[in-house]
Image (cartoon, rainbow, N blue to C red):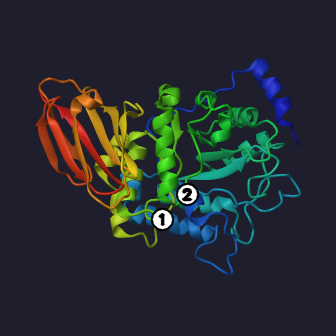
Amino acid sequence: MMFPVAVIYSVLINYFTVALDNGLARTPPMGWMSWERFRCFTDCEAEPDNCISAKLLMQMADQMVDGGYLDAGYEYLAVDDCWMSPQRNSSDGRLMADPLRFPGGMKPVIDYIHSKGLKIGLYGDVGSKTCQGYPGNEFYIPLDAETYASWGVDMLKIDCCYASHSVEGIEVMGFFLNKTGRPFLYVCCSCANPQGTYTPGANTCNTVRSYMDVQDSWENVYQIISFYGNKTEEFIDSAGPGHWHDADMLVVGDYGLSLNQQKIQMGMWALFASPLFMSVDLRDIDNKSKKILLNKEVIAISQDPLGIQGRRMFKYPVRQGNVEGWLRPLSPAGTYAVGILNSNNFGWLQYVNKTLSDFGLTHQKGYDLTEVFTGKKYGPLKPLDELILKMEPTSLFLAVAVPLS
């Protein structure tokens, strides 16, 4: 039966609290997502190894386990748009996986992914159709929530293309997901916060996209970093256990970033307390990129249980770029992640001379610092002692500062 979103919402808002209550994402979720690397490629005759299909998802599940990604914390395997059949089931109106690309349906694929110890994420849209034109959830939200639960879905990424009531639709879907009794990681696109206030999604979603779609380019990645720096004070307080601001997928290991720029994205996303969802072909990823994604020290910053989002502490211009200082409080108390980002791409080493007091660190006995990508030790450094670096173009110094007792 078809139920318009506006009608369902008007009933729920009068009789129930429409809010997230699933106990999930106490630290930023981690996993793999298909979109940035594989997009909506559905021609399996032309590209049988790279089309959105059961084969692709099952192969990525194998790689997540065999490559050590699951052990590192990447537990969700998520397919974005284009997994569906172009039409719903004619007999009961339910969503179906595309019968050619998922010949046994979605349930056997989900069972396989679960058998590997992973969790599965699917994509939906509270509009009449998805962004790529596949069936949307708009008139079928209660039915679709029940379908997802019956398949054993663990995560739903929800979009708002072609939606007449985007925020209301997201809240209604969240209500019916909760009503199934199955815990769903609820991942919401930026339409959850249409006025840019960043707070409505905190009541409804485990993660909310904070800005533009990520693309496989340094210019795009730095735009997202700059957005976080410029807007930090507007949304930092609404981030924390159970709800995170999503800077979008990691493009580490793809085509557009240098090795230093891949370290920047990984490190900055950890400072942001953003979800870490890889979008890369794990079957042939470069070993150096794989090492970045599996860096235990960076992942520890990302997954710190305090759940406090990092903030930009300073920024000053240099030739063809900027030098920025970032700080994220960690546990135990008094420990911090300290980041210095050099976005200069002029082609020379950038001389940086800062003190820990420039980051607001004041412990008079000083700190020991360990850089997380190199393991190099710095210190002990008191708040006014100089930290002198020669930084390569578009590079990141990221260290954990531990107070001396």
Residue 39's tag is none
Query: Label 2: which residue?
Result: 215
Disc 1 or 2, which lies upstream in sequence? Answer: 2
Image quadrant where one finds the N terminus: top right
From this view, report whether residue 253 is shown above or below residue 338: below
Indicate the amino acid at tag 1: Gly
Q: Position of residue 46 (x, y in %)?
A: 67, 81
Confirm or deny contact between disc 1 and disc 2 (CB under 8 A).
Answer: yes
Q: Position of residue 72 (x, y in %)?
A: 36, 53
Q: Position of residue 246 (x, y in %)?
A: 53, 42
Left or right of 260 on screen, residue 192: right
How many numbered marks are there? Answer: 2
Q: Secondary structure at mark 2?
A: loop
Left or right of 266 on screen, residue 154: right
The residue at 52%/29% (across/down) is 235
The residue at 51%/65% (across/down) is 60
Indicate the amino acid at tag 2: Gln
Q: Residues within 10 Å of mark 1 (few under 14, many from 20)?
A: some
Query: Label 1: which residue?
Result: 256
Q: Secondary structure at mark 1?
A: loop
Residues 324 and 166: in front is 324
From this view, report whether residue 200 is shown above or below residue 108: above
Q: Position of residue 193 (x, y in %)?
A: 65, 34
Left or right of 328 on screen, residue 224: right
Residues 137 and 393: in front is 393
The residue at 76%/22% (across/down) is 13
